[in-house]
Image (cartoon, helix red, strand yellow):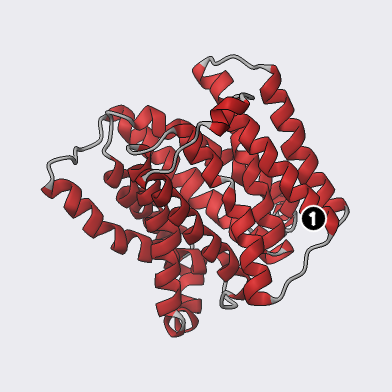
Amino acid sequence: MPETNSPIGRATQWLFNQAYVLLPLTMLMWAGNVTASKFAVGQISPMSIVCLRWAIVCVVLLIFSRKDIVRDLPVLKSRWPIIAGMGTLAFTGFNALFYVSAYETTAVNMTIIQSAIPVLVVMGAILFFGQRINIGQAVGLVLTILGVMVTASHGDLQTLLNLTINRGDLFMLIACAFYAAYALHLRSRPKVSDTAYFAAMALAAFVSSLPLLAIEIAQGKAYWPSSSGWLTLLYIGIFPSLIGQIFFIRSVQLIGPSRAGLFNNLMPVFGIVLSIVLLGEAFGFYQMAAMVLVIGGILIAERLR
Protein backbone atom coordinates (compact mmCIF):
# COMPACT_ATOMS: atom_id res chain seq x y z
CA MET A 1 0.00 0.00 0.00
CA PRO A 2 1.34 3.51 -0.80
CA GLU A 3 2.79 5.73 1.93
CA THR A 4 -0.03 7.34 3.86
CA ASN A 5 1.67 10.78 3.64
CA SER A 6 1.33 10.85 -0.15
CA PRO A 7 -1.93 11.89 -1.87
CA ILE A 8 -2.34 8.35 -3.27
CA GLY A 9 -1.68 6.90 0.17
CA ARG A 10 -4.28 9.14 1.83
CA ALA A 11 -6.83 8.34 -0.87
CA THR A 12 -6.17 4.61 -0.48
CA GLN A 13 -6.48 4.85 3.29
CA TRP A 14 -9.80 6.71 2.94
CA LEU A 15 -11.10 4.17 0.41
CA PHE A 16 -10.27 1.21 2.67
CA ASN A 17 -12.50 2.68 5.37
CA GLN A 18 -15.54 3.16 3.10
CA ALA A 19 -17.43 -0.14 2.93
CA TYR A 20 -20.26 1.43 0.94
CA VAL A 21 -17.80 2.41 -1.77
CA LEU A 22 -15.80 -0.81 -1.69
CA LEU A 23 -18.82 -3.10 -1.96
CA PRO A 24 -20.41 -1.59 -5.12
CA LEU A 25 -16.95 -1.56 -6.74
CA THR A 26 -16.53 -5.22 -5.77
CA MET A 27 -19.88 -6.19 -7.24
CA LEU A 28 -19.10 -4.28 -10.44
CA MET A 29 -15.86 -6.23 -10.84
CA TRP A 30 -17.59 -9.53 -10.06
CA ALA A 31 -20.35 -8.73 -12.57
CA GLY A 32 -17.60 -8.03 -15.08
CA ASN A 33 -16.34 -11.54 -14.40
CA VAL A 34 -19.55 -12.94 -15.93
CA THR A 35 -19.08 -10.84 -19.07
CA ALA A 36 -15.42 -11.84 -19.22
CA SER A 37 -16.43 -15.48 -18.94
CA LYS A 38 -18.56 -15.05 -22.08
CA PHE A 39 -15.56 -13.64 -23.93
CA ALA A 40 -13.50 -16.58 -22.67
CA VAL A 41 -15.69 -19.22 -24.35
CA GLY A 42 -13.56 -20.94 -26.97
CA GLN A 43 -10.52 -18.92 -25.90
CA ILE A 44 -9.54 -20.72 -22.68
CA SER A 45 -10.92 -23.84 -20.98
CA PRO A 46 -12.90 -23.49 -17.69
CA MET A 47 -10.48 -25.20 -15.29
CA SER A 48 -7.58 -23.36 -16.90
CA ILE A 49 -9.30 -20.12 -15.84
CA VAL A 50 -9.87 -21.42 -12.31
CA CYS A 51 -6.22 -22.45 -11.93
CA LEU A 52 -4.42 -19.65 -13.76
CA ARG A 53 -6.47 -16.84 -12.21
CA TRP A 54 -5.17 -17.82 -8.76
CA ALA A 55 -1.65 -18.25 -10.10
CA ILE A 56 -1.79 -14.61 -11.25
CA VAL A 57 -3.06 -13.49 -7.84
CA CYS A 58 -0.28 -15.37 -6.04
CA VAL A 59 2.44 -13.83 -8.23
CA VAL A 60 1.08 -10.28 -7.86
CA LEU A 61 0.74 -10.57 -4.08
CA LEU A 62 4.21 -12.10 -3.74
CA ILE A 63 5.69 -9.14 -5.64
CA PHE A 64 3.83 -6.31 -3.92
CA SER A 65 2.92 -7.69 -0.48
CA ARG A 66 5.77 -10.01 0.48
CA LYS A 67 6.66 -7.88 3.54
CA ASP A 68 3.14 -8.30 4.93
CA ILE A 69 3.18 -12.00 4.08
CA VAL A 70 6.54 -12.62 5.79
CA ARG A 71 5.51 -10.60 8.87
CA ASP A 72 2.21 -12.43 9.28
CA LEU A 73 3.46 -15.89 8.29
CA PRO A 74 3.59 -17.30 11.87
CA VAL A 75 -0.08 -16.42 12.46
CA LEU A 76 -1.11 -17.74 9.06
CA LYS A 77 0.71 -21.03 9.65
CA SER A 78 -1.07 -21.50 12.97
CA ARG A 79 -4.44 -21.13 11.21
CA TRP A 80 -3.47 -22.85 7.98
CA PRO A 81 -6.01 -25.74 8.02
CA ILE A 82 -9.05 -23.45 8.22
CA ILE A 83 -7.52 -20.96 5.76
CA ALA A 84 -6.78 -23.73 3.28
CA GLY A 85 -10.29 -25.09 3.70
CA MET A 86 -11.93 -21.73 3.09
CA GLY A 87 -9.72 -21.01 0.08
CA THR A 88 -10.58 -24.39 -1.39
CA LEU A 89 -14.32 -24.01 -0.79
CA ALA A 90 -14.89 -20.36 -1.68
CA PHE A 91 -12.31 -19.77 -4.39
CA THR A 92 -11.77 -23.13 -6.08
CA GLY A 93 -15.01 -24.91 -5.21
CA PHE A 94 -17.33 -22.02 -5.99
CA ASN A 95 -15.79 -21.22 -9.36
CA ALA A 96 -15.43 -24.86 -10.43
CA LEU A 97 -19.06 -25.65 -9.57
CA PHE A 98 -20.17 -22.43 -11.25
CA TYR A 99 -18.52 -23.46 -14.53
CA VAL A 100 -19.79 -27.03 -14.30
CA SER A 101 -23.36 -25.97 -13.53
CA ALA A 102 -23.33 -23.70 -16.58
CA TYR A 103 -23.28 -26.82 -18.75
CA GLU A 104 -26.23 -28.44 -16.97
CA THR A 105 -28.70 -25.70 -16.11
CA THR A 106 -30.01 -22.44 -17.50
CA ALA A 107 -28.61 -18.96 -16.88
CA VAL A 108 -31.98 -18.01 -15.32
CA ASN A 109 -31.70 -20.81 -12.78
CA MET A 110 -28.09 -19.93 -11.98
CA THR A 111 -28.87 -16.27 -11.38
CA ILE A 112 -31.83 -16.98 -9.14
CA ILE A 113 -29.93 -19.57 -7.13
CA GLN A 114 -26.94 -17.23 -6.77
CA SER A 115 -29.26 -14.72 -5.13
CA ALA A 116 -29.43 -17.19 -2.22
CA ILE A 117 -25.94 -16.18 -1.07
CA PRO A 118 -27.04 -13.28 1.18
CA VAL A 119 -29.94 -15.37 2.48
CA LEU A 120 -27.54 -18.18 3.37
CA VAL A 121 -25.19 -15.68 5.02
CA VAL A 122 -27.99 -14.25 7.15
CA MET A 123 -29.24 -17.74 8.06
CA GLY A 124 -25.72 -18.82 8.99
CA ALA A 125 -25.23 -15.71 11.11
CA ILE A 126 -28.47 -16.45 12.96
CA LEU A 127 -27.76 -20.16 13.44
CA PHE A 128 -24.06 -20.06 14.32
CA PHE A 129 -23.52 -16.58 15.78
CA GLY A 130 -26.91 -15.83 17.34
CA GLN A 131 -27.31 -12.71 15.22
CA ARG A 132 -30.74 -11.10 15.08
CA ILE A 133 -32.26 -9.14 12.21
CA ASN A 134 -35.00 -6.55 12.47
CA ILE A 135 -37.98 -5.99 10.23
CA GLY A 136 -36.12 -3.45 8.09
CA GLN A 137 -33.33 -5.87 7.30
CA ALA A 138 -35.83 -8.64 6.53
CA VAL A 139 -37.80 -6.37 4.18
CA GLY A 140 -34.61 -5.22 2.49
CA LEU A 141 -33.48 -8.80 2.00
CA VAL A 142 -36.80 -9.79 0.43
CA LEU A 143 -36.77 -6.77 -1.91
CA THR A 144 -33.25 -7.46 -3.15
CA ILE A 145 -34.12 -11.10 -3.84
CA LEU A 146 -37.24 -9.99 -5.73
CA GLY A 147 -35.05 -7.67 -7.77
CA VAL A 148 -32.72 -10.52 -8.68
CA MET A 149 -35.68 -12.72 -9.64
CA VAL A 150 -37.11 -9.98 -11.85
CA THR A 151 -33.71 -9.64 -13.51
CA ALA A 152 -33.27 -13.36 -14.03
CA SER A 153 -36.78 -13.91 -15.39
CA HIS A 154 -36.83 -10.78 -17.58
CA GLY A 155 -39.98 -9.76 -15.74
CA ASP A 156 -41.86 -12.86 -16.90
CA LEU A 157 -43.65 -14.65 -14.05
CA GLN A 158 -44.18 -17.70 -16.24
CA THR A 159 -40.42 -18.12 -16.54
CA LEU A 160 -40.19 -18.47 -12.76
CA LEU A 161 -43.15 -20.86 -12.59
CA ASN A 162 -41.55 -23.12 -15.22
CA LEU A 163 -38.25 -23.54 -13.38
CA THR A 164 -37.09 -27.12 -12.81
CA ILE A 165 -34.47 -28.57 -10.51
CA ASN A 166 -31.61 -30.55 -12.03
CA ARG A 167 -28.05 -31.51 -11.16
CA GLY A 168 -26.72 -28.16 -12.32
CA ASP A 169 -29.08 -26.35 -9.96
CA LEU A 170 -27.82 -28.51 -7.10
CA PHE A 171 -24.20 -27.75 -8.01
CA MET A 172 -24.96 -24.02 -8.00
CA LEU A 173 -26.69 -24.19 -4.62
CA ILE A 174 -23.68 -26.02 -3.14
CA ALA A 175 -21.41 -23.35 -4.62
CA CYS A 176 -23.47 -20.62 -2.96
CA ALA A 177 -23.28 -22.44 0.37
CA PHE A 178 -19.48 -22.58 -0.01
CA TYR A 179 -19.27 -18.84 -0.52
CA ALA A 180 -21.69 -18.07 2.30
CA ALA A 181 -19.51 -20.14 4.66
CA TYR A 182 -16.50 -18.12 3.54
CA ALA A 183 -18.29 -14.81 4.12
CA LEU A 184 -19.24 -15.91 7.64
CA HIS A 185 -15.69 -17.10 8.30
CA LEU A 186 -14.33 -13.63 7.52
CA ARG A 187 -15.80 -12.22 10.73
CA SER A 188 -13.42 -14.43 12.75
CA ARG A 189 -10.40 -14.41 10.46
CA PRO A 190 -6.94 -14.09 12.05
CA LYS A 191 -5.70 -10.60 12.87
CA VAL A 192 -3.31 -10.20 9.95
CA SER A 193 -3.17 -7.77 7.04
CA ASP A 194 -5.81 -8.15 4.34
CA THR A 195 -3.21 -8.85 1.66
CA ALA A 196 -1.34 -11.49 3.70
CA TYR A 197 -4.57 -13.28 4.56
CA PHE A 198 -5.76 -13.17 0.99
CA ALA A 199 -2.38 -14.44 -0.26
CA ALA A 200 -2.77 -17.53 1.92
CA MET A 201 -6.29 -18.09 0.59
CA ALA A 202 -5.15 -17.62 -3.01
CA LEU A 203 -2.31 -20.11 -2.53
CA ALA A 204 -4.78 -22.67 -1.19
CA ALA A 205 -7.07 -22.00 -4.17
CA PHE A 206 -4.23 -22.44 -6.67
CA VAL A 207 -3.01 -25.70 -5.14
CA SER A 208 -6.52 -27.14 -4.81
CA SER A 209 -7.35 -26.22 -8.43
CA LEU A 210 -4.42 -28.21 -9.86
CA PRO A 211 -6.19 -31.60 -9.58
CA LEU A 212 -9.23 -30.14 -11.38
CA LEU A 213 -7.00 -28.90 -14.20
CA ALA A 214 -5.32 -32.31 -14.36
CA ILE A 215 -8.72 -33.98 -14.76
CA GLU A 216 -9.67 -31.55 -17.53
CA ILE A 217 -6.37 -32.30 -19.31
CA ALA A 218 -6.86 -36.06 -18.89
CA GLN A 219 -10.32 -35.75 -20.45
CA GLY A 220 -8.88 -33.88 -23.41
CA LYS A 221 -10.97 -30.79 -22.68
CA ALA A 222 -8.18 -28.39 -21.70
CA TYR A 223 -6.60 -25.97 -24.16
CA TRP A 224 -4.06 -23.18 -23.86
CA PRO A 225 -5.37 -19.59 -23.94
CA SER A 226 -5.43 -17.68 -27.21
CA SER A 227 -4.25 -14.06 -27.27
CA SER A 228 -7.81 -12.93 -26.45
CA GLY A 229 -7.97 -15.63 -23.79
CA TRP A 230 -4.86 -14.21 -22.09
CA LEU A 231 -6.38 -10.71 -22.00
CA THR A 232 -9.59 -12.08 -20.52
CA LEU A 233 -7.62 -14.11 -17.98
CA LEU A 234 -5.59 -11.05 -16.92
CA TYR A 235 -8.79 -9.12 -16.27
CA ILE A 236 -10.28 -12.00 -14.27
CA GLY A 237 -7.04 -12.47 -12.33
CA ILE A 238 -6.45 -8.79 -11.46
CA PHE A 239 -9.92 -7.35 -10.89
CA PRO A 240 -12.54 -9.93 -9.73
CA SER A 241 -9.99 -12.34 -8.25
CA LEU A 242 -7.53 -9.92 -6.61
CA ILE A 243 -8.84 -6.40 -6.07
CA GLY A 244 -12.47 -7.45 -5.68
CA GLN A 245 -11.68 -10.11 -3.10
CA ILE A 246 -9.50 -7.74 -1.06
CA PHE A 247 -12.27 -5.13 -1.14
CA PHE A 248 -14.82 -7.71 0.02
CA ILE A 249 -12.60 -8.95 2.85
CA ARG A 250 -12.12 -5.37 4.05
CA SER A 251 -15.86 -4.62 3.77
CA VAL A 252 -16.80 -7.63 5.91
CA GLN A 253 -14.26 -6.45 8.45
CA LEU A 254 -15.95 -3.02 8.51
CA ILE A 255 -19.68 -3.87 8.54
CA GLY A 256 -19.99 -7.65 9.04
CA PRO A 257 -20.90 -10.52 6.71
CA SER A 258 -24.69 -10.17 6.75
CA ARG A 259 -24.75 -6.53 5.69
CA ALA A 260 -21.89 -6.99 3.21
CA GLY A 261 -23.51 -10.11 1.77
CA LEU A 262 -26.66 -8.16 0.91
CA PHE A 263 -24.68 -6.26 -1.72
CA ASN A 264 -24.21 -9.49 -3.72
CA ASN A 265 -27.59 -8.74 -5.25
CA LEU A 266 -26.10 -5.72 -7.04
CA MET A 267 -24.27 -8.10 -9.39
CA PRO A 268 -27.27 -8.80 -11.66
CA VAL A 269 -27.97 -5.07 -11.86
CA PHE A 270 -24.40 -4.29 -12.88
CA GLY A 271 -24.55 -7.27 -15.20
CA ILE A 272 -27.42 -5.57 -17.07
CA VAL A 273 -25.42 -2.37 -17.48
CA LEU A 274 -22.36 -4.26 -18.73
CA SER A 275 -24.51 -6.26 -21.14
CA ILE A 276 -25.89 -3.02 -22.59
CA VAL A 277 -22.49 -1.33 -22.86
CA LEU A 278 -20.33 -4.25 -23.94
CA LEU A 279 -22.76 -6.64 -25.61
CA GLY A 280 -25.28 -4.19 -27.07
CA GLU A 281 -28.31 -5.66 -25.31
CA ALA A 282 -31.51 -3.60 -24.88
CA PHE A 283 -32.64 -1.98 -21.62
CA GLY A 284 -36.30 -2.54 -20.73
CA PHE A 285 -38.81 -1.73 -18.02
CA TYR A 286 -38.13 -4.92 -16.08
CA GLN A 287 -34.44 -4.01 -15.77
CA MET A 288 -35.36 -0.63 -14.33
CA ALA A 289 -37.78 -2.31 -11.89
CA ALA A 290 -35.08 -4.76 -10.84
CA MET A 291 -32.59 -1.96 -10.19
CA VAL A 292 -35.13 -0.09 -8.04
CA LEU A 293 -35.91 -3.23 -6.02
CA VAL A 294 -32.28 -4.18 -5.43
CA ILE A 295 -30.96 -0.73 -4.60
CA GLY A 296 -34.09 0.10 -2.58
CA GLY A 297 -33.77 -3.13 -0.62
CA ILE A 298 -30.17 -2.36 0.31
CA LEU A 299 -31.06 1.20 1.36
CA ILE A 300 -33.99 0.00 3.50
CA ALA A 301 -31.88 -2.67 5.16
CA GLU A 302 -29.15 -0.17 5.97
CA ARG A 303 -31.43 2.66 7.12
CA LEU A 304 -33.52 0.39 9.38
CA ARG A 305 -30.78 -1.99 10.55
Q: Amino acid at mark 1?
A: Gln
Image: 198 above or below 25: below
Viewer-proximal residue among 17 and 64: 17
Please provide percent x and percent y for residue 294: 72, 39
Task: Report whether 36 appears left or right of 112.
Answer: left
Residue 73: % across, % down: 45, 79
Residue 99 sits in quarter: top left
Which residue is painted at 62% across and 27% down in the image?
157
The residue that mark 1 highlights is: 137
The answer to whether any part of residue 103 appears in the image is yes
- Classify the position of the C terminus by image quarter: bottom right
Q: Residue at x 60, y 24 (%)?
A: 154
Left or right of 283 in this view: 243: left
**Image-based side of 209 in relation to 221, left or right:** right
Snapshot quadrant of residue 150: top right
Mark 1, residues whose alpha carbon is within 10 Å: few (<14), some, or many (≥20)? many
Residue 128 location (% of width, % of height): 62, 75
Task: Residue at 59%, 67% (x, y): give it.
Answer: 184
Viewer-closest of 61 and 186: 186
Residue 228 position within the rendered picture, expressed as x and y whole percent measured from the top left: 32, 28
SS class, disc 1: helix
Height in image: 144 above or below 78?
above
The residue sitting at 58% across, 53% down in the picture is: 117
Name the one closer to the observer, 85 or 58: 85
